[in-house]
Amino acid sequence: MSDILSDEKKWYVIQTVPRNERKVVEQIMMKEVEVYLPQIQAMRIWSDRKKMIDVPLIPGYVFVHTSSREERIKAISNTLGAIRYLMYLQRPAIVSDQEIQNIRISLQAPEKVKIEEKFINVGDLVLITHGLFKGLTGYISMLRGNYKLTVNIKELETALSVQLSSSDVTLLKKLDQK
């Protein structure tokens, strides 16, 4: 019998609108469908404060545990913020129970789990979104340790480098990899 037609519950992945994971989870829970949103604490820095907050381990995705097509449809139908099921080989992608268990085990030692929100590399063009240089763009010239990056500011047409956190920039364009 096909995995999709089986009565056994399987884990499926729903893609969400960015930063809408919790809203999607709440709506799916109200439909009495099992849903899982792995979260981890991360430091967020604003101009006036720093705070530890819970953030999704895998931003933009939630997991639902269902046994039937009808239940999968019920989970996503009329769920504001839910975009679609993640597909693999033209079928809803299935995440194994073991992979979900691995995520749960890894969250027992959250200090060892590192969230990489932005995949920024040397040569990428970024927009500075916070701080004194907000609004300027630059190319990443160096990455140093945890979220410290050095940006050459192109508007200043100089080799001036500014050290920033990855939370202070938005990726505009990836360096073309050949």
Image (cartoon, grey):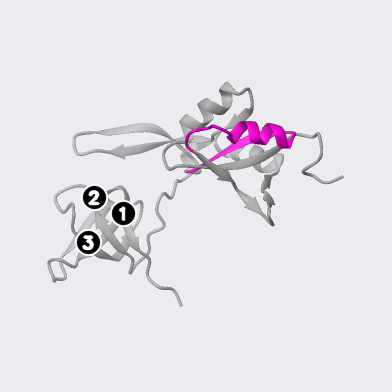
Residue bearing mark 3: 137
Amino acid type, residue under disc 2 in the picture: Thr
Q: Is residue 67 magenta?
A: yes
Q: Which sits earlier in the primary sequence, circle 2 or circle 3?
A: 2
Q: Nearer the viewer, residue 124 or 112?
A: 124
Asked whether disc 1 touches disc 2, contact meaning CB atoms under 8 Å apart, the reply is yes
Amino acid type, residue under disc 3 in the picture: Thr
Residue 102 seen in the current view: no
In the image, residue 139 lies at what x, y percent? 27, 66
Q: Which mark is residue 170?
A: 1
Mark 2–mark 3 Cα distance, whole angstroms, equals 9 Å
Asked whether disc 2 touches disc 3, contact meaning CB atoms under 8 Å apart, the reply is no
Question: Which quadrant is the N terminus positioned in?
Answer: top right
Residue range highlighted in magenta: 60-81
Reply above or below: 140 against 85.
Answer: below
Amino acid type, residue under disc 1 in the picture: Thr
Provide the secondary structure element on which disc 3 rests.
strand
Mark 2 burial class by Cα count in 10 Å: few <14, some 14-19, many 20+: some
Reply above or below: 49 against 121.
Answer: above
Would residue 32 be found to the left or right of residue 68 on screen? Answer: left
Q: Which sits earlier in the primary sequence, circle 1 or circle 2?
A: 2
In the image, residue 57 lies at what x, y percent? 49, 41
Would residue 124 be found to the left or right of residue 61 on screen? Answer: left
Provide the secondary structure element on which disc 2 rests.
loop
